[in-house]
Amino acid sequence: MSKNDERYDAIVIGSGFGGLYALHHLRDTMGLKVRAFDGAGGVGGTWWYNRYPGARVDAPSSPFYAYTFSQELVNEWEWTETQTSQASVLAYLEHFAERYDLMKDIQLDTWVNDAHYDEAAQRWTITIDGGETVSAQFLICATGALFVANKPDYPGIDDFAGECYHTGRWPHDEVSFQGKRVGVIGTGSSGIQAIPEIAKQAEHVTVFQRTPQYSLPARNRALTAEELAGYREGWDDLRESMLRRGGWPFKTIRRNASDYSVEERHEIYEALWEEGGIHLAINSFSAVLMDKELNAEVSEFVRGKIAQIVKDPETATKLMPDYYFGTKRLILDNGYFDVYNRENVSLVDLREDPIEAFTAASVRTKEGEHAIDILVLATGFDAVTGSMLNLNPKGRGGVSLQQKWEERFETYLGTTIADFPNLFMIHGPTSPGVLYTMPLGGERTTQWIADCIGYLKENDLGAMEATDEAAEKWDREINEMAAQTLYPLTDSWYVGANIPGKPRQFLAHLRGSQYFDQLGSVAQEGYEGFVFEPSREKTHENAVSG
Ligand code: N01
């Protein structure tokens, strides 16, 4: 066999949380011949790239932001903090890859430059760096929800002659901020995590803020040996609880705001703020993301906290968010608002004082010039859809994904796309993806994909494909679910508003456990919404043998 026609049952693109588990499950549990590819020089996906100072999990983390399927794995990994750092997550993923002997089937430093479906062969052929082609019946895209870096196109930005780093493409060598004047653009999770760390070293940090943010205290601390032992002991129950709830093990309190007085509600907000993490959002009142008045009350509570923390009233005012609390990605910080009490940090409010241009050594805004040595772009990603559009697979009739998704990011179940048979996405648009615990979501999605593959094999089928009708219906359902909340009213990357020209559409399924129940029912009820083709390979073999 020439190097140009390596044949597999499945190709996995990406070796982050989703891709590594997909390789393990499809190869070791399903017994398939699988090959994984990743353009990065190591496994870890998001966690390989996003190694900026302060990078941590921005969701309930140790030990829940991890694979859940194996008690042995849970027992042997020593998480040390309540909010896991990027370095720990990456070390964990590297351990996972070694423990399950995955590296022999992962080709790193290898971009997939083309992927197209061969209707006659019912197979996907990919072209990788160097022009080699590889084919498989199934293409599993674990390409990452936060992969394609968004770089602003301010006039002259490429003329800036100092060091320039995007948080999502952070160098592997240490970046020293010692004695440097640093400009940071962007105050999403990445900027808010990085700024306090950079400020510890830099001579001066100028933060360029477009939208002020609600950020909640992460209250990161050491995880005690007793806590870890308790989690391990009760793992089955915890896992069960994660499966039933939104991917988290703890109960979300379903309180009605109207059952409490204003004072009582404030006591609850205070307690949840003190507790830290995302509790203020998920454990205050169930309607907080639906009821504008209630949301305004919580928003005001957080603004009050900002006013208490930030000593300079003018800076505090600039930091006050004015969108609906929780409708952009919630941020968990370790000393973000406090950082503005330092003498070496200043804030530029781009709404009042926009950036006009860059020079070789400065950022020029309407009202002044800010000399900088290092520019940090914490400007986010073409989230959820960017990595798939980058891959741009070509499906039935040669239709490209860029054509297919020109106006709307239509999928069926967030995992499949009409016209793209045998292609599956992990954390695709309209899956719970970024609103669920991603490692667990990846496991559950992969298990469902594996069941699809098993079903095809058992029934001598060669291809499965979502119908347009099913995709349209799914799209309406996702839209209707989002429309019951305040999410669509805010410009955020959840709706694609951070990327100029991107079609506006809410990109996630809002009810994680219901979603996985739905996936299960579709499978149990014979895969409604899909069409199947008999296996041509089998037919051919039968014809030959018959
Ligand atoms: O990106 P963001 P991020 N001029 O898009 C601003 C995940 N994450 O990298 O709000 C000036 O949230 C933009 O302003 P605005 C997490 O899910 C996970 O911080 O659009 N500013 C915003 O302030 C997170 O949500 C972990 O008005 C510009 C910022 O840049 C997601 O990644 C850790 C601009 C971008 O914020 C993305 O977070 C860290 C411009 N031209 C992040 N363009 C984990 O724990 C953009 N901005 C897994």
Image: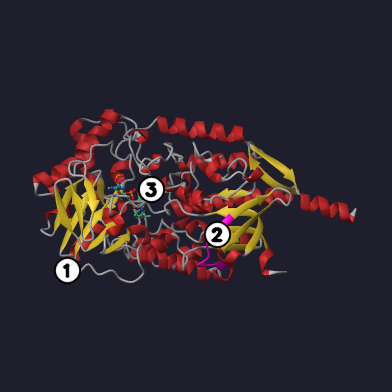
Numbered tag placed on residue 112 in the rendering: 2
Q: Nearer the viewer, residue 210 or 244?
A: 210
Q: Is residue 57 left or right of residue 508?
A: left
Q: Nearer the viewer, residue 192 or 262?
A: 192
Numbered tag placed on residue 179 in the rendering: 1
User: Is 453 placed above or below 268 here?
Assistant: below
Residues at discs 3 and 2 in contact (Cβ within 8 Å): no
Residues at discs 3 and 1 in contact (Cβ within 8 Å): no
Residue segment shown in magenta? 106-114
Q: Position of residue 237 (x, y in %)?
A: 46, 52
Q: Is residue 335 magenta?
A: no
Numbered tag placed on residue 406 in the rendering: none
Label 3 residue near ligand 1, CB within 8 Å: no
Would you call the spot at circle 3 few (<14 residues within 10 Å), some (14-19), or many (20 or more)? few
> Measuring 62% from the left and 45% from the top, which residue is drawn there?
420
User: Disc 2 to disc 1, how far (Cα)?
Assistant: 41 Å
* First of labels 3, 1 by sequence position: 1
Split into 4 quadrants, where in the image is the N terminus? bottom right
Residue bearing the label numbered 3: 250
Tell me the kind of residue under disc 3.
Answer: Phe
Kindly state the secondary structure of the residue where label 2 is placed.
Answer: strand
Q: Position of residue 10 (x, y in %)?
A: 63, 58
User: Is 138 placed above or below 39 here?
Assistant: above
> Measuring 46% from the left and 68% from the top, which residue is drawn there?
41
From this viewpoint, is residue 218 visible? no
> Measuring 34% from the left and 40% from the top, which residue is drawn there?
253
Q: Nearer the viewer, residue 364 or 116?
A: 364
